[in-house]
Amino acid sequence: METKINQTSIVLVCGDITKETTDAIVNAANEYLISGGGVDGAIHDAGGPAIMAECRQIGGCPTGQAVITTGGKLAAKYVIHTVGPVYHGGNKDEAELLQSAYRNSLKLAREKKLQSISFPAISCGVYGYPQKEAAHLAIKICIEFARENTDIKLIRHILFNRKIYDIFSEELSKLV
């Protein structure tokens, strides 16, 4: 599914984020920037040790913030590491932190003059964020960003299965 906001295309696909050819891919990282499971583990495995070496130099990343490293062996030149919130029932600023993770990743891409970025479904795996709410917030932030900025021409959401793709697709349809 695809929509255009100003000069930015927002695209949803089922796929493997480690195969993306956008300027940057976003890693759903942990605060220590240490390779974990899920998307994080897959990105570190596919990208090789150069990513982890830069993560060690950076040292960490607070929830809702973003940092950037090389893409290592990935097709993407950069990896933007952002930390989404662990879901604790919605009463611990999880929505604001998740929105900040997307917003700060986009801002960092714009600062680095990147033209394209690919996101996973941040916090939707082991962090337990309700997928429908997470999709709504992710799409909302990307649409707001595209309305206010013309620097990034392509925002892709790379979704790990058909169920999450359908949820994101429904939210995109509602918001445009």
Image (cartoon, rainbow, N blue to C red):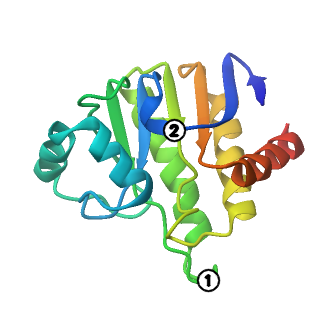
Q: Residue at x 59, y 22 (%)?
A: 154
The image shows residue 174 at horizontal and vertical percentages of 88, 46
Earlier residue among tags 1 and 2: 2
Left or right position of 34 against 94: left
The image shows residue 17 at horizontal and vertical percentages of 48, 38
Element under label 2?
loop
Element under label 1?
loop
The image shows residue 175 at horizontal and vertical percentages of 84, 43
Find disc 2 in the rendering and name its residue. Answer: 16
Query: In the depicted view, which residue is nearer to us: 25 or 99?
Result: 25
Find disc 1 in the rendering and name its residue. Answer: 91
Q: Amino acid at mark 2?
A: Asp
Query: In the depicted view, which residue is nearer to us: 139 or 71?
Result: 71
Q: Amino acid at mark 1?
A: Asn
Q: Distance from label 1 to label 2 (Cα)?
A: 32 Å
Query: In the depicted view, which residue is nearer to us: 78 or 65?
Result: 78
Q: Residue at x 70, y 45 (%)?
A: 139
The image shows residue 151 at horizontal and vertical percentages of 53, 19
Q: Relative to 43, is 109 above or below?
A: above
Q: Relative to 88, is 4 above or below?
A: above
Circle 1 or circle 2, nearest the eye = 2
Q: Residue at x 32, y 24 (%)?
A: 77
Q: Residue at x 68, y 29 (%)?
A: 10
- Please rate how many residues cluster around mark 2, counting C-alpha atoms within 10 Å: few if below 14, some from 14 to 19, many from 20: some
Left or right position of 81 against 167: left
Residue at the right extreme, as displayed: 174
